[in-house]
Amino acid sequence: MRFVFSRVMQSGFATGFRVAVILSVCLGFVALTAAAADDPRRTPIVIAIEKVAPAVANISTEQIVTYRSFDPRWGNRYRPFDDFFEEFFRPYRLRQERKEMPLGSGVIIDEEGYIVTNEHVVHRASNLKVRLADESVHDAELISSDADNDLAIIKITTPKKFAAVKMGTSKDLMVGETVIAIGNPFGYGNSVTTGVLSAKKRDIVIPSEHGNVEYKDLLQTDALINPGNSGGPLINIHGELIGINTAIRGDAQGIGFAIPVDKVKERLAALFNFQKISKVWLGLEVDSRAASTEGLVIARVAPRSPAAAAGLATGDLITHVDGHKVAGELDYAKQMLKKDAGDTVSLTVVRAGRPLTCHVRLEKVEALAQQLAKDKLGLTLQNLSPDQAYQRRILIREGALLVTAVDSGGPAGGMRRDDIILSVLSYRVRNLDELGALLSQVEQDKVVDIIFVRGQDRWRATVRVR
């Protein structure tokens, strides 16, 4: 009897369980059907675009365009005689008007209006304008650029909070997964194309007016990337930034490339280098590898620096700048970018478990940049303007540094007089002040790369500073 009872109880439980499962499945199906019936067009792609669109920036420049307006009183004339009539009768009137010239795209990465884009989008631009999805137009300024990696940071000058994109990662990307490109192709703002991730770690070479530019470890996609999409976001199905659209294969369709977001994040610290941008000297370095959600660890304090004078020490954990919480290098750099030489900044640090506030008076980057170049590199340098470079048959769009003397026994003893230095430590150096800002942070025995031009060729020197 016990056996029969046991079977009956088991059978009843199983039957009840099956009924419960069937009911759950049916109810779930009904719920899904009802949700889909609400708006079946609102796919995951649509949702992802809705998340990111407010952070997409259409970048343009405002230019004054002068053109000839024909005076209708003169009627129509045969074109070959235009010059004759222009010379003697002036039937044309010169007019000027401001025109917005589309340049490319970008994406807001911070609520204060910082935008990441391609360097080639903004390198010749002035009077930058940014148009957002809500049709608002804002002035913007160039903060920093990195020609070697084709990245730049601009900032909206309007003092308000902006929608920012959520940063994803490019480490776990899957070939074949859906990707979405948003940008400003041909001036058509916030245009969307979709496709798949075609490949990872692509290396390409693109010819430019300054020679061939090599891009490494790019993402490849078949989402259409047209002229004007450059600098815009490539996102995944979750609406997360996974890349910055940067190039297309001109002789083929469906082959576009983007800079992986992890590389973008890696370069942000360099792009937000306040000591290079604002030309102020603090005299400390933070260790990004030791960074935590609680702050930034001070890796080094330069002797006789403003930081040393204020009592800061290696190992201190920076938690606040002027009362603003610091969660990472971006927070730290944003606050420091607001400062000028002569300003005082309050740094709250944790030392041995106790909070401590130090007041640091910022100084101008050492005026003795020449001395730093001699001491650390063994080079004597002078500023070189684009016009001066052109006289040497070198085309550069910004300034550079001319080597005027070399200590043959120094760290850069292999360089020669008349070499033209373009970058140090992957930073574009346009004058001695910028070089001084860099060298003031470089520790003894650190290995640095120097990109320079000799004759008509570009060279790279690896130097251990002394």
Image: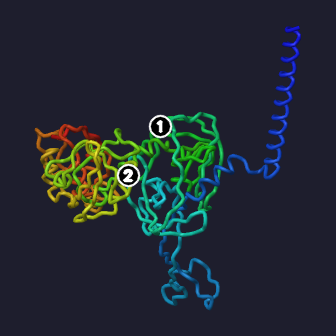
Give the quarter of the image for residue 266.
top left
Q: Which quarter of the rendered picture does the C terminus lie within?
A: top left
Q: How many marks?
A: 2
| Disc number for residue 434 | none
Q: Which quarter of the rendered picture does the N terminus lie within?
A: top right
Q: Earlier in the sequence, mark 2 or mark 1?
A: 1
- Spot occupied by residue 119 in the image (x, y as percentages of width and height): 43, 54
Left or right side of 323 for 168: right
Residue at left offset 45%, top offset 47%:
207
Q: Nearer the viewer, residue 458 or 64?
A: 64
Q: Amino acid at mark 1?
A: Asp
Callout 1: helix, strand or loop?
Answer: strand
Q: Give the vertical position of 72 relative to 183 (above or below).
A: below
Q: Which residue is mark 1?
A: 217
Callout 2: helix, strand or loop?
Answer: loop
Q: Which residue is mark 2?
A: 326
Contact, mark 2 vs mark 1 (Cβ under 8 Å): no
**Does residue 389 show up?**
yes
Callout 2 environment at 10 Å: few (<14), some (14 to 19), or many (20+)?
A: many
Render colour scheme: rainbow
Left or right side of 160 for 415: left
**Does residue 451 show up?**
no
- Spot occupied by residue 216 in the image (x, y as percentages of width and height): 45, 38
Callout 1 environment at 10 Å: few (<14), some (14 to 19), or many (20+)?
A: some
Residue at left offset 46%, top offset 65%:
156
What separation in Å lies between label 2 and label 1 (alpha carbons)?
Answer: 31 Å
- Spot occupied by residue 102 in the image (x, y as percentages of width and height): 54, 64
| Comparing labels 2 and 1, the label whose residue is closer to the camera | 2
- Spot occupied by residue 14 in the image (x, y as percentages of width and height): 84, 21
Q: Nearer the viewer, residue 389 or 184?
A: 184
Q: Amino acid at mark 2?
A: Val
Left or right side of 205 for 429: left
